Image (spheres, rainbow, N blue to C red):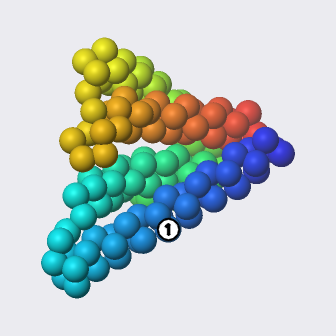
């Protein structure tokens, strides 16, 4: 439980940092465009990449806190024993999806963009670094769901 709490705290602080940087970046973008008359060239791209990281890591954080959107019409009508089985099935399906789509698919995307030596136009950041958040998030969600299964 202690490791999970540490991961939660680190992830929460990272999300706060990303959001703070994004707010400052967008404020600078608005200021430079409307007050200085010369829009900054990197702010749009940086905001886009920060939004990607915020959304994908935020999904992992929310999944770990079990605060994600869920339709509970069916589970609420089931017995406690059946609800427990349904939660187990749903968690296994989430693990499979994250493994196939986020971890394996994400690593393939990172690998291809690394091999093609792709860089972002304005920031000149390797796109593999930008896309690395996908498999990281997938691994975090898998960790959270395995932890939930073991402590059910």
Q: Residue 73's image quarter?
A: bottom left
Left or right of residue 93: residue 39? left
Q: Quadrant of the C terminus?
A: top right
Task: In this rendered view, identify the residue nearer to me: 29 or 89.
Answer: 29
Image position of 75 with respect to 110: above or below: below
Image position of 148 with respect to 14: above or below: above
Image position of 40 with respect to 7: above or below: below
Residue 26 % position (x, y): 33, 70
Task: In this rendered view, identify the residue nearer to me: 135 or 70.
Answer: 135
- Residue ID at (50%, 68%): 20
Which residue is outermost to the top? 115
Q: Quadrant of the N terminus?
A: top right
Residue 85 appears in the figure: no
Disc 1 is placed on an element classified as helix
Residue 29 % position (x, y): 28, 71
Q: Residue 118's image quarter?
A: top left
Which residue is outermost to the left? 37
> Exactly how many numbered labels are in the figure?
1
Left or right of residue 7: residue 77? left
Residue 109 appears in the figure: yes
Task: In this rendered view, identify the residue nearer to me: 78 or 131.
Answer: 131
Image position of 20 with respect to 65: above or below: below
- Residue ID at (33%, 54%): 46
- Residue ID at (34%, 21%): 114
Left or right of residue 147: residue 24? left
Which residue bears the numbered disc 1?
Answer: 20
- Residue ID at (31%, 15%): 115
Residue 69 % position (x, y): 44, 58
Residue 39 % position (x, y): 20, 68
């Amino acid at each position: 439980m202690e490791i999970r709490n540490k991961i939660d705290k680190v992830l929460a602080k990272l999300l706060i940092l990303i959001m703070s940087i994004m707010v400052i970046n967008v404020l600078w973008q608005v200021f430079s465009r409307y007050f200085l008359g010369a829009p900054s060239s990197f702010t749009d791209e940086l905001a886009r990449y920060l939004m990607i990281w915020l959304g994908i890591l935020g999904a992992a954080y929310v999944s770990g806190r079990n605060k994600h959107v869920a339709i509970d019409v069916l589970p609420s009508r089931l017995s406690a024993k059946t609800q427990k089985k349904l939660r187990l099935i749903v968690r296994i399906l989430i693990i499979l999806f994250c493994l196939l789509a986020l971890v394996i698919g994400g690593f393939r995307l990172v690998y291809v963009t690394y091999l093609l030596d792709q860089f972002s136009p304005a920031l000149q950041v390797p796109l593999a670094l930008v896309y690395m958040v996908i498999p990281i998030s997938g691994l975090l969600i898998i960790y959270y769901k395995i932890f939930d299964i073991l402590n059910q």
